[in-house]
Image (cartoon, rainbow, N blue to C red):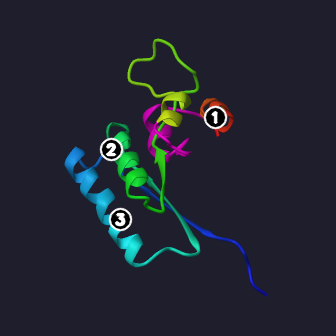
């Protein structure tokens, strides 16, 4: 019996890589995947927000077979939330995935199960 299920690999870059390093890694991933396509695997790269535009530009222009995700999203569509990112901002960058409720975020922001749910609603609506 064969399965049509695909594996999912998500690479979270966390708070690593500067602008130049992010560009270089994006290009390296493109070269690797062109030489050896991931036929039964969906791949998502999740760079820091400051690198999203650069990485999505490389993915789009070089037609790299990966999707791009964000490390965080604010549950509000807009407003006076310094440093926060909305789903609308992410959509404009062709970001299709968002990490929500990661252990680091839960610990740093002292989220609970209830308080980590709000970011999910706009993320799901934006899809």
Give the label on residue 29, or none. Answer: 3
Residue 14 vertical position relative to residue 37 in the rendered view, above or below: above
Quadrant of residue 82 in the image?
top left
Q: Are marks 1 and 3 in contact (CB under 8 Å)?
A: no
Would residue 27 be found to the left or right of residue 107 on screen?
left
Expressed as whole percent of the image width and height from the top left, the position of residue 111 reads: 54, 33
Write down the residue under mark 2: 54
Q: Nearer the viewer, residue 21 or 112?
A: 21
Write down the residue under mark 1: 126
Image quadrant in which the N terminus is located: bottom right
Expressed as whole percent of the image width and height from the top left, the position of residue 116 reads: 60, 34
Expressed as whole percent of the image width and height from the top left, the position of residue 85 reads: 46, 28
Q: Are marks 1 and 2 in contact (CB under 8 Å)?
A: no
Q: What residue lies at 57% left-to-right and 21% top-to-bottom?
A: 77
Mark 3 lies on a secondary structure that is helix
Dot 1 or dot 2, earlier in sequence: 2
Please tell me how crowded label 1 is: few (under 14), some (14-19), or many (20+) other residues with Cα within 10 Å.
few
Distance of label 3 from label 2 (alpha carbons): 14 Å
- What are the residue bounds of the magenta stretch? 93-113
Mark 2 lies on a secondary structure that is helix
């Amino acid at each position: 019996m064969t399965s049509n299920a695909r594996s999912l690999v998500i690479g979270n870059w966390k708070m690593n890589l500067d602008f130049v390093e992010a560009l270089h890694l994006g290009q390296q991933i493109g070269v690797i995947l062109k030489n050896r396509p991931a036929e039964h695997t969906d791949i998502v790269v999740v760079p820091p927000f400051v690198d999203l535009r650069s990485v999505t530009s490389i993915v789009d222009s070089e037609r790299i077979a990966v999707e791009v995700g964000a490390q965080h999203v604010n549950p509000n569509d807009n407003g006076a939330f310094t440093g926060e990112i909305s789903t609308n901002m992410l959509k404009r960058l062709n970001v299709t995935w968002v990490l929500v409720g990661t252990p680091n975020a839960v610990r740093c922001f002292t989220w609970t199960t209830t308080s980590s749910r709000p970011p999910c609603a706009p993320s799901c609506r934006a899809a």
